[in-house]
Image (cartoon, grey):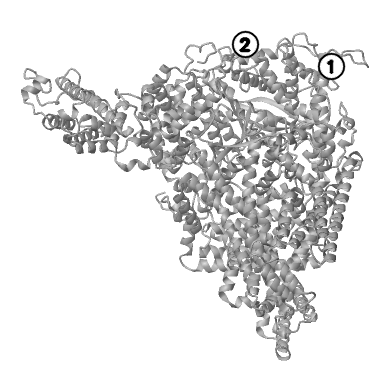
Amino acid sequence: MSHRQRPPPLAGESRRPGPAPGQNFDPASEPYNIIPLNNLLADHPSLRFPEVRAASAALRTVGNLRKPPFTQWLPEMDLLDWLALFFGFQKDNVRNQREHLVLHLANAQMRLTPPPDNIDTLDGTVLRRFRKKLLKNYTDWCYYLGKKSNIWISDRREAASDHRRELLYVSLHLLIWGESANLRFIPECICYIFHHMAMELNKILEDYIDENTGQPVMPSISGENAFLNFVVKPIYETIRAEVECSRDGTAPHSQWRNYDDINEYFWSNRCFQKLKWPIDVGSNFFVTSSRSKHVGKTGFVERRSFWNLLRSFDRLWVMLFLFLQAAIIVAWEGKEFPWQALKARSVQVKVLTVFFTWSGLRFFQSLLDAMMQSSLVSRETLGLGVRMVMKTIVAAVWIIIFGVFYGRIWTQRNQDKRWSPEANTRVVTFLEVALVFILPELLALALFVLPWIRNFIEGSNWRIFRMLAWWFQSRIFVGRALRENLVDNVKYTLFWVLVLGTKFFFSYFMQIKPMIAPTKALLRIKNTDNEWHEFFDSSKLAIGLLWLPVVLIYLMDLQIWYSIYSSFVGAAVGLFAHLGEIRNIQQLRLRFQFFASAIQFNLMPEEQLLNARGTLRNKFNDAIHRLKLRYGLGQPYRKLESNQVEANKFALIWNEIIKIFREEDIISDCELELLELPPNSWNVRVIRWPCFLLCNELLLALSQATELVDAPDKWLWYKICKNEYRRCAVIEAYDCIKHLILEIIKRNTEEHSILTVLFQEIDHSVQSERFTKDFKTTALPQLHAKLIELVELLNKPKKDPNQVVNTLQALYEIVIKDFFKEKRSMDQLREDGLAIQLSSSMTGLLFENAVQIPDASDETFYRQVRRLHTILTSRDSMQNIPVNLEARRRIAFFSNSLFMNMPHAPQVEKMMAFSVLTPYYSEEVIYSKEQLRTENEDGISTLYYLQTIYDDEWKNFMERMRREGLVNNTEIWTTKLRELRLWASYRGQTLSRTVRGMMYYYRALKMLAFLDSASEMDIRDGSRELGSMRQERSMDGFDLEKSPSLRSLSRTSSSVDLLFKGHEYGTALMKYTYVVACQIYGTQKARKDPHADEILYLMKNNEALRIAYVDEVFSGRDEKEYYSVLVKYDQQLQKEVEIYRVKLPGPLKLGEGKPENQNHALIFTRGDAVQTIDMNQDNYFEEALKIRNLLEEFRRYYGARKPTILGVREHIFTGSVSSLAWFMSAQETSFVTLGQRVLANPLKVRMHYGHPDVFDRFWFMTRGGISKASRVINISEDIFAGFNCTLRGGNVTHHEYIQVGKGRDVGLNQISMFEAKVASGNGEQILSRDVYRLGHRLDFFRMLSFFYTTVGFFFNTMMVILTVYAFLWGRLYLALSGVEGSALKDDSNKALTTILNQQFIIQLGLFTALPMIVENSLEHGFLQAIWDFLTMQLELSSVFYTFSMGTRTHFFGRTILHGGAKYRATGRGFVVQHKSFAENYRLYARSHFVKAIELGLILIVYASHSPIAKDTFVYIAMTISSWFLVVSWIMAPFVFNPSGFDWLKTVDDFDDFMNWIWFRGSVFAKAEQSWERWWYEEQDHLRNTGLVGKLVEIILDLRFFFFQYGIVYQLNIAAGSTSIAVYFLSWIYVLVAFGIYVVVAYARDRYAAKEHIYYRLVQFLLIILATLVIIALLEFTEFTFIDIFTSLLAFVPTGWGLLLIAQVFRRALQRTLLWNVVVSVARLYDILFGVIVMVPVALLSWLPGFQSMQTRILFNEAFSRGLRIFQIVSGKKSNAD
């Protein structure tokens, strides 16, 4: 019990496994969520806390307040009812917020240290702190707008009379928030509503009189549901109307207002002037975008353009361009080092031209701003327009000024013919002008060094600062005072100085300098042998093309340097955090003895003196203690033996962890016994370590004893005690043998007394240190052998007493004859009591009648015997216990985490309360019988697959089922079906897995609450009782269901439950709630969907689980009403009950559905923190034990602020399914561990990526919630929570001592869809206001970190691919134009081989694998990391990573240009089935195949027409990485496709592909059935794109005409002519081909069906005509046959280019006959591409051996665990299964 007295539990209640309402419980009374506030006299565990009663009583102090008119006031009503009656809030909203408020105040009061004097009344400080936190955003908003806050309470120490007023403000805010529905996404709108309602509340409290009526003031809105109807609904309807204007997100963002625009309307005072109060529905705010006079975008306009990258991160590009310019100027001098060149004054002056570039960039930036944001300017925001114009003018003036002053320098220099003093003076003048230009930058630098001054200026409201800031950036409510403190500043500045230093050094010497000589050489070439018609000097263009890839790489390689340095910094931070010190079970054995102390130190609350924590001395003591623990200083196990309470607590926790491992079937029964800490019995004097630690120790001790025959006792004992486990093994073995032998011999027999004497002698000689003098240690091996024999006899199912007697006799013989050093005669033995007395009446042999073997039901005895047997016999075989890799990883991580730094755990009562929130739509809950049994085309069922992948876990499951009564294996499908379905579901990515994981928090809290308050006796007796309980359970599993005492040993509850006193449930429920937002649960129930039953099953078995859903109710003919509903399962009534039903203003989904689903359920969460968990996550019991420690982080300062998001580490649990899943999980693991670690410290830009992050709930509640929901722009909804947090002055940290499981996609198609979603999301982020503001408001170095870890990563991936394009197109141009040939003759071969270096730089992409290697080294050891990396390479991981680069590039680029980002449901199933060729073609044709074919074509043309390519080695060296890209993009979908190279499947696939292409189905055909439908869907993005998007698309498509231009001049028929006529004549070919196609198509349509002979005739005539033309050409021109094939290379791309342009003009062409031709030609092209891709696949399928090799590559990870994957893939399932 804790220090606060509570009523004792009722008689007979102490072991009740759930909250027990009193006998007077009335089922008709109102259902409650956590606390029955409507019945404070109920016997509910949480009502035992006086704090709950205190908070509830405080709410009832209505006292002398004026009662609301027109309604009856009841005595039980409280302040919330009072507010509801005045302002028209809903009843269930009031009930919900009442519990919310009472729970929070009670929890906050429990945490007070020191506790208040009177715990029965609400403490003033608790209320004041809560009010300040909850209304902080409101008071900031008032200050920002210069309005006086309507909270009429002074912040000085309040008088008691203010409590009620404070409660009213807090309650009013909560009631507004609780009913605002989608308005919760617009926090400043809620501030606006609260501002006015608080004013009306003040008037009521101050008894104002209404001037118009002379009556006391009434609120402007009141009545039933008035708040919803008159305040929420008008604004909600406006948002809804705007969303409708967006045409389902396809309209440009600039044409409609999203959530952010509507919120930012409330950032200016015009909301007060225009909207007024009560809300004026006639205001132009409510006019939607489609009509005139509407309020346009506010704050920002999102426009689709790549220029957004330049706008948002202008400082980065300025730096890169200026350095590039300066570096080229310096390198041009040709000196070895740059400082040598810079000695020349002329070079110095030339470098000053960077100021032109800089001012030009500024001018360009201001033009961009004006173009992009012009629609923000209206009559109300003229200032904005003025500023845009002025900035453009000023930037233009600067260009002119620099031009004038720079011109004066050279005029003077040319006059004087040297650098005269006058010329130098002019240089100085120029520098003075430049100084004025960069003044703002210098000011920014000064403020960067003094961050607190910057924060003060940005946060203050002084007019002078506002005037200054106005020029630089528009004043907005967010993004102010974002600077970190000086220490953090220094850390990330040093990091970036190092990275930039390396990058610039590398760029100068390796990229820019080598390009200077070739450039000069090309400039020297006077006359090139042109091979085509020249329009301009091609050597100049050639120089540009040579430089293009270099510049592109120069712009992107900062990403690579960031990657390299962040890996090493991340590793260093990880090392200092003590990550990866315990990597495996061997290392755990070394530290296990300190483990109990570590658990005690970290997981158990200390008895703290008041206010002692946090002092320097305390921190120092903590650090010393951790050092001792970590390095084993002192002897913690000695302390453990003396402190049995600590040992017993440790045993309870450790055994519970192991028991849960057994429940999860990741260890077997045998491993359970080897791993658990048994309760102390048989009078063993030492700690009974788990068996797996004692393996081999006894044997080693024996060998020591037999070797050191003559050594004295002390020396021998010293040698044995060197190893703690050995000492314990020896003592335990001796104590157990002694107890065992005395146990199996009847008491009061002579044999019993003989053995008692013998043991007394041994004990005496050990105590007097005479053991080696009295006994021969050489006899010990014989004794050991016989003892093993004895124990084995006792372990047999059928025990033979005679054999036991024989063994005991043999033991007795050895002891008497060989063990004693002094031989004793029979008489001496009798005298010493070691032999039978002559006078005894005993008949028969010794021991014959004295043995009594305990009954087989005495499980305690036999369990100890088994343990003794293990200790006596075990050798090294236990190094791999437990066998399961997951169990080993979890034990290792948990044990390692306890030696890391973490805050101390408070008592459960004093911890922060928290909730977990999971959004769910319609994913799998529990696999059904059909899903498990249904076989795919290869005859593989899901269950068979799972049994194969999780082989050991299946065996453990069957073992557990047999223990629980399974007799015949077929029963698994009948009586044990539910268990089977759960077992399978816990291995997929299902809701049941997530729920099980999250409910471990509840189990852990109950257990920790018990340990917090349990006395020594409770714990000691408890561990014994549990020991015996466990044995009873394993004896007889049949009666499990029938026996009530053992009911709680079933799998849903913990065995520790048996010890609970009753208060643990109340404590755990007050501290933890789990809400699953099952959006369509109501619809599922109505449809009798099995998902609904399974969700109900989960509720039934999990007490703390609540389901929130949106209920749709038909109210009129076509009208629907929408409600937010919360339900739970009532254990008393044995049914689902509805707790709250809050009406919504309309449909929930206006934007992206998931954030709105989270948002509607957020009002039902409780506590100070909320953890966001996705549907594909899992949790572990041992990690849940550390949640108290994690939540304490909210109280620590990290840098300048306390955290608002705690980042939590993830473990990707899907890595073992296939090699693909392994690559994905390796990539993801390095991102979620090392990547996030560096972002949080030292870079300070961690946002919110992973889902297990823990949010400061009240902070986010009042600032827009835990995600953003605007349509399309917020498609990556969760990352915006991080952006929003940072912009609003939050702080995000990352903690690695706790982890949560996460599933990832496992098949290539799923992975590609996931990558497409993420890349599209990043494309949308670039357009967003959040990224723009972070790019401008963060300081320079944090901006760099932000860019390179979010959108920059995707941009730079695209740059890598663009570099390959630029390089190859450049080479093609050089080859076909003849520049290459001329350069070769000029012997400046250097010019061309230099570019080879650039090609190899592309291979630096390899360095992106570096983070994986480094993180692996840190956590699993360097050799293991290298081995893993090599294995990955052999499994073609490079092919996969190259392929995914293509996916990212395609979708990122397309989204920025044309939009079209959408949520892609990837499905989270298991991927073992073969994907058809047609499906792969549909997915990858446009993103990969076509692009790979284009690059392949360039490489082929280059090989055939380049003089350099004649040298095979040069060609290979130059193009190998490009060929690798081409092969990867074409082959990856087949390499990573199960049975990808199976000949029969390949043949079937091709037939299927051709059927799909020629399908002439109905209008309603889907893309999967009809090529035409798919083809139209692939162009969807072009329908919605703007004019600029279409123009860019056409310009990009023009590249395909270049092939024709270049190649026709190379044909023999051209006869070397370079006339332009050759090119124009070549178009005749295109027109003829087109004409022939039209004729054939016409003939086919007209004649093919009825007059077939005419159709054949037309074909015949065309063939004759073609033959004649070819003969004529051969005869009369230079035409050769090879020309036919060469011309194909020229004209096929032309056709494709025409097709792509036709698609852009689809709207115009679709009405003409031409469109049918376009469609037909497009079909032919897709057949052509399909065949090109199919050829290598078919070839590899035809070759023998490739299929098995591919299977090995794809499933190697599973192979190494001895799996039968080949059967799975080929479907050759053995009959046995």
Is 1305 drawn above or below residue 855 in the view shown? below
Q: Is residue 1239 above or below residue 502?
A: above
Residue 1376: x and y in percent read 70, 76
The vertical placement of 987 against 766, above or below, is below
- Name the residue furthest top: 64
**Percent position of residue 1325, x then y:** 72, 47
Count of numbered circles in the view: 2
Q: CA distance from mark 1 to mark 2?
A: 32 Å
Residue type of the residue flagged with mark 1: Lys
Tag 1 residue: 203
Q: Is residue 1601 visible?
A: no
Give the class, few, some or many, for how many residues have Cα within 10 Å of label 1's Cα (few <14, many ≥20).
some
- The answer to which of marks 1 and 2 sits earlier in the sequence is 2
User: Residue at (63%, 55%) from the top-left corner?
Assistant: 503
Determine crowd level at label 2: few under 14, some 14-19, many 20+ residues with C-alpha closer than 10 A. some
Q: Amino acid at mark 2?
A: Asp
Residue assigned mark 2 = 120
Against 624, residue 223 (above or below) is above
Identify which residue, 47 or 203, lies in the foreground.
203
The percent coordinates of residue 1138 (x first, y second) are: 65, 25
Identify which residue, 1146 or 1364, lies in the foreground.
1364
Kindly identify which numbered label has been placed on residue 1699: none
Q: Quadrant of residue 1210?
A: top right
Label 2, secondary structure: give it.
loop
| Mark 1 secondary-structure assignment | helix
Residue 787 vs residue 104: left or right? Answer: left
Expressed as whole percent of the image width and height from the top left, the position of residue 113 reads 59, 18
1028 sits to left or right of 1173: left
